[in-house]
Image (cartoon, rainbow, N blue to C red):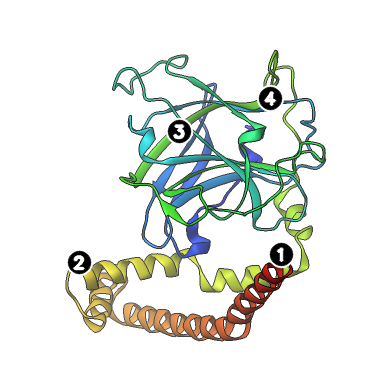
């Protein structure tokens, strides 16, 4: 339970997505369940990571990460991209080290397994981890170095393959997933270290402590990101797309459909007021988004282009 509580959710809401997942302790069972629904509308990934460790986790004498897991929702692990993420500094920036892992298919297409059946131990050597920004490789990025220790560790399910360009997995399987997790640890070539009976689970900061230690720029940007990419707004956008693109309604018809749907549960006037407030909030988000693009995003892209050109000229 302590291990489960050390993790936080990092689904694709920040990208405008509507995926949803959670890591839960399974009562009276020797494993946890990471389950949810991964949707490709606006995003395409589910993830989790530990809160920052109180002290960097020393792995200098280890050779890699291992995970004991089994996929219970289906028998098509190859139709998703599974990744392990390592953070080797305290910057909390967008660059991390990632490696893909291959979860084997079950020998039998049967989910009625006992507690001790169907487990796979998957080892990922440290040399497999590459520096990434989002799903893309950082060209020329340094190799993973264990000397500084680990500050966070995480896992993700994604439609994006790690590569130089943003590349989606062909025949990706969206929808429900349920991955059972028994152990997560580090191995040496001759022996194994696991976070289990005789090894204490590393202490992590609380969410409040973690928020206080975030860089100032991140503290300033997160409230704006929550306004622009709230999960409720993302789900409304997805519902609007379904009504307009799949059902052939125009935007006004879709809005009136929403009014009628809410009227059944809360009445006409409250439903109308709710709809008007949603429209006002979405208009505010749209205006703020435009201002940020003009004042922040576009200048930042221009700055990056100039830096890249200067580097090329020097070479």
- Depth order, front residue of 314/190: 314
Q: Point out the tag, 1 or 3, that comes first from the N-terminus.
A: 3
Per the image, the residue denoted by label 3 is 179
Q: Which mark, residue 315?
A: 1
Indicate the position of residue 203 as horizontal and vertical percent values. 76, 37
Marks 1/3: CA–CA distance: 47 Å
Determine crowd level at label 4: few under 14, some 14-19, many 20+ residues with C-alpha closer than 10 A.
some
* Pointer 3 with pointer 4, Cβ within 8 A: no
Q: Are marks 2 and 4 in contact (CB under 8 Å)?
A: no
Tell me the element at label 2: helix
Q: Quadrant of the N terminus?
A: top right
Q: CA distance from mark 4 to mark 1?
A: 47 Å
The answer to whether 59 appears left or right of 86 in the picture is right
Q: Nearer the viewer, residue 141 or 75?
A: 141
Look at 79% across and 57% down and name the residue there: 213
Image coords of residue 84 (percent x, y): 57, 39
Disc 4 on helix, strand or loop? loop
Secondary structure, mark 3, is strand
Q: Earlier in the sequence, mark 2 or mark 4?
A: 4
Separation of marks 2 and 4 at Cα, in angstroms: 48 Å
Residue that label 2 marks: 246
Q: Which mark is residue 195?
A: 4
């Amino acid at each position: 339970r302590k291990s489960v509580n050390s993790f936080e959710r990092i689904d694709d809401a920040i990208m405008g997505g509507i995926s949803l997942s959670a890591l839960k302790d399974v009562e009276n069972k020797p494993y946890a369940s990471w389950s949810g629904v991964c949707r490709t509308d606006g995003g395409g990934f589910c993830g989790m990571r530990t809160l920052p460790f109180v002290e960097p986790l020393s792995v200098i004498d280890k050779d890699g990460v291992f995970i004991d897991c089994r996929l219970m929702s289906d028998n098509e692990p190859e139709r998703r991209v599974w990744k392990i993420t390592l953070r080797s500094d305290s910057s909390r920036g967008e660059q991390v080290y990632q490696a893909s892992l291959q979860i084997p298919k079950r020998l039998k297409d049967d989910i009625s397994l006992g507690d001790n059946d169907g487990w796979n131990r998957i080892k990922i050597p440290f040399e497999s981890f590459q520096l990434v920004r989002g799903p893309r490789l950082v060209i020329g990025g340094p190799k993973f170095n264990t000397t500084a220790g680990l500050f966070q560790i995480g896992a993700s399910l994604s439609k994006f393959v790690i590569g130089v360009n943003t590349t989606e997995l062909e025949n990706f399987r969206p929808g429900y997933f349920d991955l059972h997790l028994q152990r997560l640890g580090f191995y040496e070539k001759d022996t194994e270290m696991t976070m289990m009976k005789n090894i204490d689970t590393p202490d992590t900061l609380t969410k409040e402590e973690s928020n206080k230690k975030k860089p100032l720029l991140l503290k300033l940007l997160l409230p704006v990101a929550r306004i622009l990419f709230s999960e409720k707004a993302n789900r409304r956008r997805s519902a609007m797309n379904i009504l307009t693109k799949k059902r052939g309604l125009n935007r006004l018809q879709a809005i009136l459909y929403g009014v009628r749907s809410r009227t059944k549960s809360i009445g006409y006037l409250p439903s109308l007021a709710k709809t008007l407030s949603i429209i006002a909030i979405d208009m505010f988000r749209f205006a703020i988004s435009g201002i940020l693009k003009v004042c922040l995003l576009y200048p930042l892209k221009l700055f990056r282009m100039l830096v890249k050109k200067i580097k090329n000229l020097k070479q």
